[in-house]
Amino acid sequence: MLSIKKIMPFMMVACLTLTGCGNKTVNNDKNIKWPTKNVTITIPYKAGGDTDLYGRLIAQKLTDKFKQNFVIVNMPGGGAMIAAKTVMAAKPDGYNLLFTHTGAALIAEASNFAKFSYTDDFTDVATAVQDTTYVALVKKSSGFKNLQDFITYAKANPGKLRYAVTYGSDNEYVLAKMEELMGIKLNPLDVGVGSAARMAAFIGDQADVLVVNYINARDYVEKGDFIPLGICAEKRVAGMDNIPTFKEQGYDIILTKKYELRFPKGTNKAIVDKLDNAIKEITQDPEFKDKLAKYYATPYYRNAEQTAMEDKKDVTEYKKYFEKAKNK
């Protein structure tokens, strides 16, 4: 009969060869065969919005690279929580991914809308895209020519202008900043999750103010139906040079959306590294860059460690803001 001392080394070796021991992933076989079947990329919004567009571009590139289908599944609802929780609960075998952006994920976490952590409760893979085109819009029929017209009216009519909001998301943060810095009071209306829902409410005259990525509203702006008030960016965006930033108009409202991929927690590090390297290659692909430029977005690569570190820092800053706003 083997003694405990003789058995222990074998137990240790067995543990180290498993994909997880004590809920910690340790297997890092660089020659792992992955993917060998379809990979699902879940997006928390309806088809047609910015997240969906960028996710589909990446899915096609990954399909081309790995010769396996990377399939987009749109799963709106619950303030983007349904998709997140579905992927979180999935088997960590490398065949289920969440594709979302920091504007929704980090603000939902910081505001306590999400009862979990996007940085702690998933396995980060990489960041792939950056979009700085978040723009506030009113309709031509409003009579507002510019931001100052809008502020003057809002101050004289507190709570009258309806703002299309998704709580626990980037546009709620912009709403709070607009009210704080401009000294106005708007009427927030929860019209559903995602840019498509907010666009529909705005076009249908259920809301007077809309904040979305520019690509979602470009045709209406170019026709003159929508009037841009300002972009939530540090500087003007190439291709949108005629639209001023909020910052240059005296209001420090900045929100950059970074689009990221995450596996369920505990996914084999070898798979994570393989996908991470693929995302890095895609962000260096001139064709990918050109396609993103059509939407005024840019490739933006961060590996898993950098994504997690910078996201945690941003969550901390957002938490400070929401705590400050709550105590006013």
Image: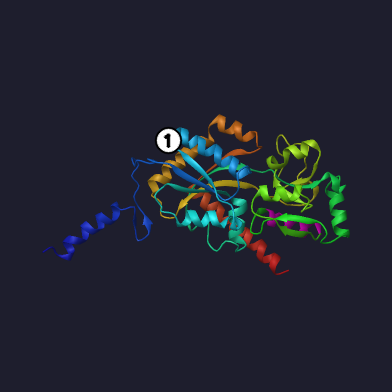
Residue 173 vertical position relative to residue 227 in the rendered view, above or below: below
- Name which residue lies at 73% across and 56% down: 175
Question: What crowding class fits label 1: few (fewer than 14 Cα within 10 Å), some (14-19), or many (20 or more)?
Answer: some
Span of residues in magenta: 171-183
The relative height of residue 121 versus residue 300 in the rendered view (above or below) is: below
* Main SS of residues in magenta: helix
Tell me if I can see residue 246 in this picture.
Answer: no
| Quarter of the image where the C terminus is located | bottom right
Q: Position of residue 111 (x, y in %)?
A: 62, 62
Which residue is disc 1 drawn over?
Answer: 66
Q: Residue at x 53, y 34 (%)?
A: 284
The amino acid type, in three-letter code, at marker 1 is: Phe
The spot of residue 168 in percent (x, y) is 64, 59
In-image side of 53 versus 7 (left or right): right
From the viewer's perspective, is 328 left or right of 302?
right
> Which quadrant of the figure contains the N terminus?
bottom left
Furthest-left residue in this view: 1
Residue 7 visible, this angle: yes
Residue at the image position 18 percent from the left and 63 percent from the top:
5
Q: Residue at x 65, y 47 (%)?
A: 256
- Is residue 173 magenta-colored? yes
Image quadrant of residue 218? top right
State the image coordinates of residue 94 (x, y, percent, origin top left).
41, 47
Check disc 1 and report its element: helix, strand or loop: helix
Out of 110 and 93, give the one closest to the viewer.
93
> Which colour style is shown?
rainbow
Between residue 245 and residue 61, name the one nearer to us: 61
Residue 202: within the magenta?
Answer: no
Which residue, as the protein is rendered here, is positioned at the far front? 204
Vertical position of residue 223 compared to residue 97: above or below: above
Which image quadrant for residue 89? bottom left
Front-most of 261 and 56? 56
